Image (cartoon, rainbow, N blue to C red):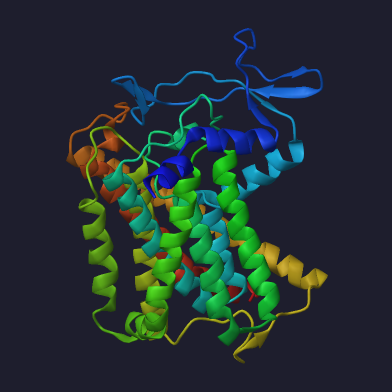
Amino acid sequence: MRELLSYLHEPELVARFQRRCGLFLVRDPHHGPQRKKARGRTTWSVLQPSQVVRGTTVPGPPVMFSRPFEVRNRFLHVLFLVSAALGHEVFYITCLPFIHWSLDPFLCRRLVNMWTVVMYVGQVMKDVLKLPRPTSPPVVKLEPRVDAEYGLPSTHAMAATAISFTVLLSAPSRIQFQFEWGLLIAVTLSSLVCLSRLYTGMHSVLDVLCGVLISALILSSTYPYWESIDRFQLSSSFSPLLGVFLPLLLSYSYPQLDHYSTTRADTTTILGASGGCWVGYWLDHQLGGPLHPLGEKIPARLPPLTLNSVFRGGARSLLGIVALLGTRQLVKTLSLKALFSCYSVEKSDPNARRRREIEVPYKFVTYMAVGLVNSILVNRGFVLLGLL
């Protein structure tokens, strides 16, 4: 078993997958860091942070240097980069709210709850186990921002599995659709995200497999209690207190590392957004329940795809994203200004935002506000504008 785990964690296994997909590390020192054409192939450069400790490359504070690579299959390159983007903040701040605005607030609430649990478990496991990501060479790394983080498990794989199958398990009671097609879409999307983590060189095969298995375990163990969690979240008088203080406590008690990593900030972002949505859905229920975009008859039929429905959906998405991004920017600016003043920190200090006493509260408050606006105000604004 140890030999198998070691084999699945080998960087060379990832590098072989990348080469089969047409992604090659350029070892010729005469290749510059600029993008250029060479024999019909495209050469790119990537920045990779790493640190050498006792002869071994491990995650550490960012030390940026160029590592050129060559792309020989443009289709797979674009496909896997788009798939990898499904696990980034831009996707979460657009896709999850879109489900609330244009499909079903019930599904969005379930998704946010399960997404938060699997992401928190995954992030904490990374910083407790401290297993490094694949090394370069032989691996090409396409996402240098997260290279200072540890590798196992892949939270992209965990989130993709959780989101896809939470929708698949929850949607039949809310929306009329063919389950077999839903299963095919769930498997396809989660598989693409998992493979993208190998293609981008950010995870080993072991990281990805563990992410999928851990997420499946969390889903299967919590599934019998989803209805009870829904009732508590919407009806209990203790629900808003739990929704605020538990995520805040988990943010402050996040494991400390001997170097700065983005995992604490990312985890606090997730917990803050989840806390805002949790409180927002409770308050929305007290005000008379969420406004259902598909009508009151459940399970609802998906509306026909017409020019009018596309226009209204696009308008809702545009206005909703503007509202969330505006909230994010406003609360972020005000909270940072207050915290810098409280702790007598200069705005020009590049490391100020990395201090726990500043990073945790500003991230938490900012994204809690985003969660509240998403779950309470946006749909009501659509009603006033005649878009819902």
Question: Residue lying furthest top in this view?
Answer: 30
- Nearest the viewer among 88 and 218 is 218
Vertical order, 218 against 197 (above or below): below
Vertical order, 29 against 68 (above or below): above
Vertical order, 125 against 53 (above or below): below
Q: Is residue 13 visible?
A: yes
Residue drawn at x 23%, y 65% as measured from the top left:
245
Q: Please state the horizontal and vertical placement of residue 140, each as a whole percent of the image.
A: 56, 29
Instruction: Count the numbered circles shown.
Output: 0
Q: Is residue 379 left or right of residue 127?
A: right
Question: Which quadrant: the C terminus?
Answer: bottom right
Write down the quadrant of residue 52 in the picture: top left
Q: Please state the horizontal and vertical placement of residue 180, each as a whole percent of the image.
A: 68, 77
Residue drawn at x 35%, y 80% as measured from the top left:
229
Q: Is residue 141 left or right of residue 213?
A: right
Vertical order, 271 against 387 (above or below): above
Residue drawn at x 64%, y 72% as measured from the top left:
183
Residue drawn at x 65%, y 27% as measured from the top left:
24
Q: Is residue 277 left or right of residue 77?
A: left
- Nearest the viewer among 326 and 224 is 224
Q: Please state the horizontal and vertical placement of residue 81, each as a whole percent of the image.
A: 63, 42
